[in-house]
Amino acid sequence: MKNAILPGHTTPTKVLLNASTIGDLPACIKKLKEMMNWEEGERVEVSSTKIRVKGINCVWKTSTIDPDASSGVILTFNSDGSINLLSGVVEIGTGTKTVLAQMLAEKLKMDIDHIHVRMKVDTQTTPEHWKTVASRGTFMAGRALMEAADDVIKQLKEIASCVLRCSPEDLEVGYGKVFLRDDPSISVAIKDVAYGYKYPNGNAIGGQIIGRGNYILRHMTKLDRETGAGKTGPEWTVGAQGVEVEFNPKDYTYRIINAFSVIDIGRVLNDKAAKGQVMGAMSMGLGFAGRETFQFDQWGRVLNPQLRTYRPLRYGEHPNYFAAFVETPQIDAAYGARGVGEHGLLGMPAALANSLSIAAEVDLYHLPLIPELIWRMKEALKLLH
């Protein structure tokens, strides 16, 4: 808590932070403390063969991004008033396109079932999106989506204003209608204007409404080779993580019981999806923290290329995962949502190393944290003394 990064501090690359770009790390630490029942004690000797320990750490992360990275979104209406959402974000399990559909449904006050998200990406015709990496999909595509949504809202109002004989500024869009702000009973259905409005005599105006939006990162820079200064990402996401372990001091084996993460991801738009992202990342982090590694021969060839010899965590070996969030909205993000992806992974190795260091009473700095490594470090410590 004493060393928590705060608004007003600077990053390692000399960027001044504020609440929007750093979030609330002390709040994450406080919530983690409650979740882990920290007051029970950090190290408890249950028996001669079991020591229960808790280890924690804090994380903060930005992303190294091309200064001109951009994202585009196209929205096209169908004749029934439904919308097609086209984005270059590639869906690789992040749930980004689900969140984009939620954002659009909120913006247009419409049923999410009437939003058709195109999952496949054709690099020749789909709007450009920088990369599906670095926890940037929701942020960048979200900003592009908001611009595209504003574009279709403007077009809907312009056509509806001709039909309703009023100024576009007097109109609102939502609930399947374009209606007068001060008298919602005067309205026209979106489906009647989104594909062109036809008057009773056959005259028509408008046509299919097609909205476009684009977002390009602002004020990004390259790092100065001499000073290391530069802004490589729009914000730093912070969090606090911990693990609870049962350690056997006789044979240096251990069992991870619980793993915890509290991340400040701005406003949480989809709680279940966000927790799924964090918990999945936590399992990956514990996998290479505790066992995953490559073995090489003298020629650099991998000796354990199969899952028989390269052992990730298997079913039944996982601890209980707990994920929670602190919400400090990011001002320049769509609906205040800060990205989350890798964050659940980042601190798991350090949290596990901290817990085992406390349990074995030896400093552990190497991965993976297998019993043999702990034993070797203990033996080395004995020789030093």
Image (spheres, rainbow, N blue to C red):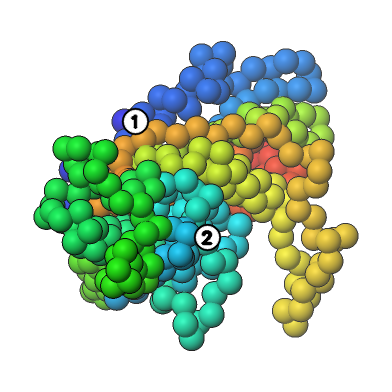
Per the image, the residue denoted by label 2 is 116
Q: Can you say which quadrant of the picture contains the C terminus?
A: top right
In this picture, residue 260 sits left or right of residue 145 = right
Eyeballing the image, is 26 above or below 292? above
Quarter where residue 202 is shown: bottom left
Q: Earlier in the sequence, mark 1 or mark 2?
A: 1
Residue 255 is labelled as: none
Q: CA distance from mark 1 to mark 2?
A: 40 Å
Asked whether residue 52 is in view, the answer is yes
| Badge 2 element | strand
Asked whether residue 59 is in view, the answer is no
Q: Can you say which quadrant of the picture contains the N terminus?
A: top left
Residue at image point 80% right, 23% down: 49
At label 2, counting other C-alpha atoms closer than 10 Å, the crowd grade (few under 14, some 14-19, many 20 or more) is: some
- Residue type at the position of mark 2: His
Most foreground residue, 30 or 131: 131
Residue at image point 56% right, 39% down: 272
In this picture, residue 372 sits left or right of residue 337 = right
Eye-nearest disc, 1 or 2: 2
Most foreground residue, 195 or 76: 195
Eyeballing the image, is 21 above or below 304? above
Most foreground residue, 375 or 333: 333
Eyeballing the image, is 141 above or below 257? below
Per the image, the residue denoted by label 1 is 26
At label 1, counting other C-alpha atoms closer than 10 Å, the crowd grade (few under 14, some 14-19, many 20 or more) is: many
Quarter where residue 29 is shown: top left
Residue 28: image x %, image y %? 40, 32
- Residue type at the position of mark 1: Pro
